[in-house]
Image (tube, rainbow, N blue to C red):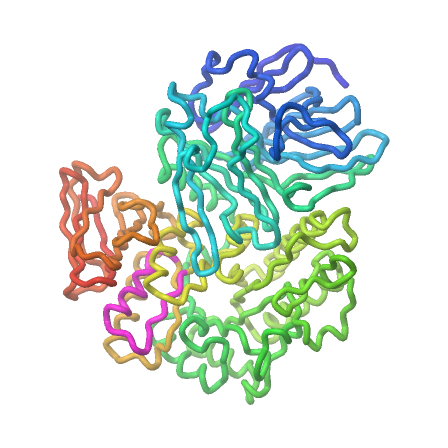
Amino acid sequence: MTQNPKQRIDIFENGLSLVFDVTEEGDVRLLHGGCLPFEEDRIEEKARQGFRVLEVQLSGEDRGEYHGRSHRASYPGLRMKYVRHYEERNATGLRVVLEMEDPATGLATSSFFQFHDGLAVLKSWTELHHRGTEELGVEYVSSFSLNGLAKDGAGDQDDKMKLHLAHNGWQSEVQWRSNTLPELGLSHMTDRSSKRVSLSNTGSWAAAEHLPMGLLENAEAGTTLFWQIEHNGSWHWELLNQFDHLSLLVSGPSEHDHGWWKKLLPGETFASVPVAVGWVRGGFEEAIGELTRYRRAVRRPNADNEHLRIIFNDYMNCLWGNPTTQNLLPLIDAAADVGCEYFCIDCGWYSPGVWWDGVGEWLPSEERFPEGIKYVLDYIRGKGMVPGLWLEIEVMGIHSPKLAEADDSWFFMRHGKRVKDRSRYHLDFRNPAVVAHADEVLRRLVEEYGVGYIKMDYNINAGLGTELDSDSLGDGLLEHNRAYLAWIDRIFATYPELVIENCSSGGMRMDYAMLSRHSIQSTSDQENYVNYAQIAASSPAALTPEQSAIWSYPLREGDDEEVVFNMVNALLLRVHQSGHLAELSPPRRELVREALTVYKAIRGDIREGLPFWPLGLPKVEDGWVSFGLRRGGRRYVAVWRLDDAASEASLPLPGMAGKAADCRLLYPQGRSGGGCDWNAEAGVLKVRLERERTARLFEVTEL
């Protein structure tokens, strides 16, 4: 190993600063990361040893310090010595690579920091290279590690730091909450805490309870750190105190959090899951704005996110998984009439009756479609829409006829048994036979049926993972996760015009491993349109607006205002139209048509707009909810009055104080029940909604 003298490594790129120190002993410290200049005197000399650039724990190795359940003070993490660093430029931007090595085991590490031109965001991950002679067992490796998160500003972390988290759940997705660290139980009472504020996801729903991201705001310094774990399986992050500073560790799966353990043989390499990290001057909205720009930059280039075509799907508050030729034809006519551009036949098309536990062949039911499903798909195409089908390719029902062709190697296995969840088995995409099966299903749907849209659902969770051909349960899950992403990449390469919606019981797999590939994401299975308003308004902090598919499902028994509310839910995002359109009265159906006409006029701004929240992030108990998009001098503002007695609300618009502007009701036009006034001096939009449970879409244009 090369010996290197003490040195300082300063990286400044796109407004971000990274400062590394290499001691005379070769110890590497990441002293600073952020958008403010580094102030040397904010870190005492005795604390610098706690500014680890990397944590890695091997089996049989010691642990240092008082670490509790945290992943700090790992070995050989504490033994790693500097080898070299280098910088290179690629199509994305500057890449900084820091190489270290453990002299005791021969484990070498490469820490990657990939900057993105024009963005205050970098992507970080770690590669382990075994250059020794003995087998190693890896229990934990960080993808990003940074201490000193609260060192900017004179106040204590208890007073100035605020953590923003997105809670997630079925039909209750994207519930943002903001808390101080003491409110979460992490009070700054000692220089190193065994207590963590930590989140872990275990299993193949990456957003089962929380979104794989977080934002940490320093109110005194006026900055916000944000991170996003770009993985479709198990992940972990934690905040804790060490050496009297606040520290963040971010990773994929670990042994004691997820049952992940990796055997590393001499000559082998392992890469951790990637994490996007960024800093902005400002708070939550500024951070989400930068993250939105980053998400657009790293997403697979595709026409769908350029055109934002309108999808009709027959499921929600409509056919409920009972599609037949007879049921579909009137809906197809109505969807085409109001201006939909895709028509997707949802679940049930492959079975005459109860279908849940028999899926896997993906062949159309002759009883449902006596003339053949291609007749209906061609009918959709004849109406000027692109036909689509629902699919759940990663599962096989426990009564599927396809099981006759499969053996245990096709499935996740634990304790010698096939993993079963909700009467389905989980397919293992590491198996070439599984991949061949999935390839054939996609080929048939696209090449024989002419499908141009697939709603790819995923309604089970694989849990810890699989023991088959893996070093641990978590290792099997991680390798499956990566194999599935490789398969999706190949499908998009084969069928570049195919649109595949990412759905997982709604938003249970809302992560940017998936969303860097898929152009559109189902946000929820929420069946109540009033409840959906809060999910819709919160969703642009979780994903780009143009990827956020929102159900709009006018009800048979509703009135005009119910239709308007439903449509406003989706108009600044991605319209996922449903409901019994063919049975709506002509005036109510006309409201749907008007909304979709407005959407087509503004969707060019949606795909480039940045979100803001005039009333703050929505909460379940709120009486008013609002969310907007801004692009240039134009702002679109959706407003919902829920169960609030007040008929007026004042909405401050960021950056608009002192500016002359015109405000108008954009949807529904020429209708009473709501209006707006602009207060230029205060930069406030005053809106009126005369009834509870009503909504309107406004446009504010700078003059």
Up-down relation of residue 618 to residue 596 (above or below): above
The structure residue drawn at horizontal position 71% and vertical position 47%, both measured from the top left corner, is: 475
The structure residue drawn at horizontal position 44% and vertical position 46%, both measured from the top left corner, is: 166
Q: Quadrant of residue 150?
A: top left
Q: Residue furthest right?
A: 133
404 displayed left or right of 215: right
Up-down relation of residue 143 to residue 351 (above or below): above
The structure residue drawn at horizontal position 14% and vertical position 65%, both measured from the top left corner, is: 672
Report whether residue 616 is seen.
yes
Task: Tell me where residue 23 appears, x and y as whole percent.
Answer: 64, 13
Up-down relation of residue 165 to residue 575 (above or below): above
**Residue toward you, 420 or 444:** 420
Task: Tell me where residue 39 appears, x and y as whole percent.
Answer: 45, 15
Q: Quadrant of residue 557?
A: bottom left
Up-down relation of residue 256 to residue 30 (above or below): below
**Magenta residues, as a range?**
550-573
Q: Quadrant of the C terminus?
A: top left
**Residue toward you, 86 or 576:** 576
Task: Tell me where residue 264 appears, x and y as whole percent.
Answer: 78, 38
Report whether residue 600 is seen.
no
Q: Quadrant of the N terminus?
A: top right
Q: How many labels sit on residues?
A: 0
218 falls in the magenta region? no
